[in-house]
Amino acid sequence: MGEITKLTLVNLVSKIKSKEISALDACSDYVNRIVKSKKLNTFVTETLEQAISSAKKIDDNNLKEGILSGAPIAVKDLFCTKNVETTASSKILKGFVPTYESTVTSKLWERGAVLLGKLNCDEFAMGSSNETSAFGNVINPYKVNDENIVPGGSSGGCSAAVAADLTVATVGTDTGGSIRQPAAFTGIVGLKPTYGRCSRWGIVAFASSLDQAGPMTKNVSDCALMLDAISGFDEKDSTSANTKKEEFLKNLNRNIKGLKIGIPKEYIVDDMPKEIQDLWDKGISWMKESGAIIKDISLPHTKYALPTYYIIAPAEASSNLARYDGVRYGFRASGKDLNEMYENTRSLGFGNEVKRRIMIGTYVLSSGYYDAYYLKAQQVRRLIKNDFDLVFKDVDAILTPTAPSSAFKIGEKKDDPISMYLNDVFTVPINLAGLPAISIPAGFDKSGLPLGLQIIGKPFDEQTVLNSAYALEEKIGFKSQVKDWWM
Amino acid sequence: MADNKFDYYLDGKTAKWEVIIGLEVHAQVTSSAKLFSGSSTKFGSDPNSQVSLVDAAMPGMLPVINKFCIEQAVKTGLGLKAKINRFSKFDRKNYFYADLPQGYQISQFKFPIVGEGKIVLDMPYGTKVVGIERLHLEQDAGKSLHDQDPENSFVDLNRSGIALMEIVGKPDLRSPEEVGQYVKKLRSIMRYLNTCDGNMDEGSLRADVNVSVRKQGSQQLGTRCEIKNVNSIKFMQQAIEYEAKRQIDIIEDGGTINQETRLYDTKKNETRSMRSKEDAHDYRYFPDPDLLPLVLDSEFIENIKKTLPELPDEKKLRLMNDFGLSSYDASIIISEKDISDYYEDVAKNSDYKLAANWMIVELFGILNKEGKEIKDSPVSAVNLSKLINLIKNGTISGKIAKTVFEQMVQKNENPEVIIEKSGLKQQSDPKELEIIIDNIIKKNQDKVIEYKSGKIKLFSFFVGQAMKDTAGKGNPQLINNILSKKLK
């Protein structure tokens, strides 16, 4: 007991398949930990009893075929789950129980995984610290001087749950860094796949042209396995890509000899802590040691990425969130007429950050402002994409830090949205360009908080991204420093 | 027709006024499934029985383009002789309403699927070409029901997501009569193509009517008002007349027209302001990020071209050139697909010209009297063609045929049976007729002498006698021939 939750996904599934561990034992261990870990506030909804009975069913019927057979997995509460409440961590969806299952999560269950529950996140995935959740912030399993630290965001429940061994792996979503930044803040691996690699069907939409689901795991092998499980074309999502099915875990290897790795000079930003620059330099040396060729590159439009993102993402969000109007599902406040009902429902149902973005988005799409903001942002987005297209003629992947800082204290940036937004400076350009990128844990800062490195790849070249990360992971030899202080 | 000149100018206190009209027609695409979901589009089903998760805008649901609706739009575009845009885009038109579940309508704003085309109208004063600005695809909204409950409004989402074609016409129309012809022609083209059933009472075809006025002879366009969502040709015409007069009165009294959206009250026959330009919604159009741009390859368009049926204008030419119909008759026959189908059924087994005459004069007379459409005709095409053949082969005279036709209307009976039963068959045996005529000549020797001495008008007297003696059933052609011979 207790040791099972330390196992990686790959190891756990292989032990369940070989019947060394029963699915029920695995599930029970996770359930026990979850029950004792309420302090971290990682779960919005727990489905522990159903999990136990699903695990039993797997053992009783010897359902050991799936590549995730018996893996107990909790998912971000942005994925619609059939008959399980789905809130996007918003009051406006409180009580909403979908009658359908998202494509990505249905792939998990089809492959033998067992649902533990729904993980906390920033409201509608809008945030970088998990503090915008209507159900309270998640607490990072890493702690500094007894002070609570944010787990990153928006997939902060996911990152904390993986780091605290409350789920063997998970799926998050990444619109501007929401998988990679929390992964970096909690010492785990997080991959944002190429836009179109995983279906968006059944995921509560934030910004449709940027949203992408992806794995968050204990290590790179687990990440490859999870990507095998959740990726693939879906005719229900017009933006999903009809590419051939790949086998990422099977093709995972550390041979990156001769691989050309680009180092973009624009990612050296003012005020970046020295330890992050040092870590990046270390990353470069590890890459070299593994036989990769390092090349200095330039992505000249990088500085426009953040403002571009904060026009496009809110614009799409303002429209995507219009459906939460109190008419058909979720929260409804009363009003004397239809308009007042809308106003009351949306005023009380949405939190401040969501309202802020809806207002920004409404503004930039308004007639008279559209050309200056939205259209211009789309044009700049194209330039940012062109930057990457150009450098990918010379390099196979790009290495950068994941975030310009380590995790910060809860409340530290809550009232300073700009400083909060700046946390996404290294992750946002990748979403704008639709590229795959991984964050892997690469070390600790002086206060003991984990730091991540990001590897960015060509469109649909997740294999190179994973292989580079796999090679680097071995060199880094990262060891989790999570002490179970909350138990 | 040369003396028929266009003369729809309205008299004001100071001048004669010309009315400028442009239509935005919303035509429901004939398709069993909705534009972005697989839900059924059947009319008249129980409320909210044809609503998918996508139509109800549940969280995480995504639209997927229904390829058939795209084909239908392209087909319609080809029927309007319009440019098909190989690249088009779907945009979101954002506004809040209870029957708009997404909070936006998916439409095409900047890049419509079909560009400029035209419709040709046959007016009494000649042919008129009306320009089409564009055709784009969009989703319909649901329906709010305000009269079901004293406290609440109900929403029926069956219509939500149904594919509509918005066909934007240029402001080329100048009278209510032209508007009527325009809508009928557009509807007819779409019915020929089977891309819109055009049933206005089911809401499959409705229009926003843009009206402005200017002094006769002026070249400048006046400020227009848009009358929203009018669902019958008669109402469109009444609304235009009212609206034009309203605008003329305002201008002549020294006022100016405010650009605004108006509603037509069918009960009071007046238009009322709905919202002014200042209150107009800001729809915040932007490309729908859930859908990729729509790119059509030339093969796709060519394949649709190959399936195009003969359209009214081409059919009219064929009826005139090959069947020898007059332009007037041909116009009537092609005006509706149902009429032209009926005509083809009658004509293929009888006589082209007689078929047209009988339909236009006799059949339409009855249909008009009974307020019926051709599809509810009491006389089937088969029976009408039989009747025409009976006239053609001399079994009955045209006059008797009318009597027979009246009986056919009563119970759609085979004319051959009617003739047999009522003994209406034409007397066409020359020998029998000769005996009757010899008898008449014998009895009227004085008239024969008068005739032969030059009073040739008496010929009709003999014909009349012959008809009388045959109880009206004598074959007039034969009687004529025999009489001419005998009286020589």
Image (cartoon, coloured by chain):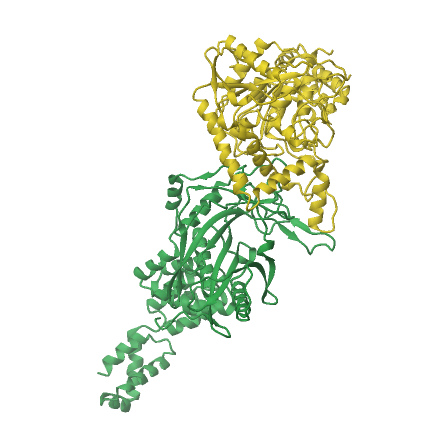
Chain colours: A yellow, B green
Residue A360 location, quadrant = top right
For image coordinates 54% across by 39% down, the residue present is A374
- Quarter of the image containing the N terminus of chain B? bottom left
Horizontal arrangement in the rendering, residue A307 relative to residue A346 (left or right): left
Residue A415 in view: yes
Residue A144 locus on image (x, y percent)? 73, 17
Q: How many marks?
A: 0
Q: Residue at x 74, y 29 (%)?
A: A136
| Percent coordinates x, y for residue A81 in the rendering | 66, 30
Q: Where residue A363 appears, x then y in whole percent? A: 60, 42
Residue B217 falls left or right of residue A61: left
The reply to whether residue A170 is visible in this rendering is no
For the residue pair A136 and A76, the one nearer the viewer reads as A136
Q: Is residue A110 left or right of residue B366?
A: right
Given residues A138 and B100, the one toward you in this image is A138
Q: Nearer the viewer, residue A415 or A73?
A: A415
In the rendered image, the vertical position of residue B428 relative to residue B346, given as above or below: below
Q: Quadrant of residue B359?
A: bottom left
Q: Tell me if residue A140 comes above or below residue B118 in the rendering.
A: above
The quadrant of the picture occupied by the C terminus of chain B is bottom left
Q: Position of residue B15 (x, y in %)?
A: 47, 73
Q: From this view, report whether residue B134 is shown above or below residue B347.
A: above
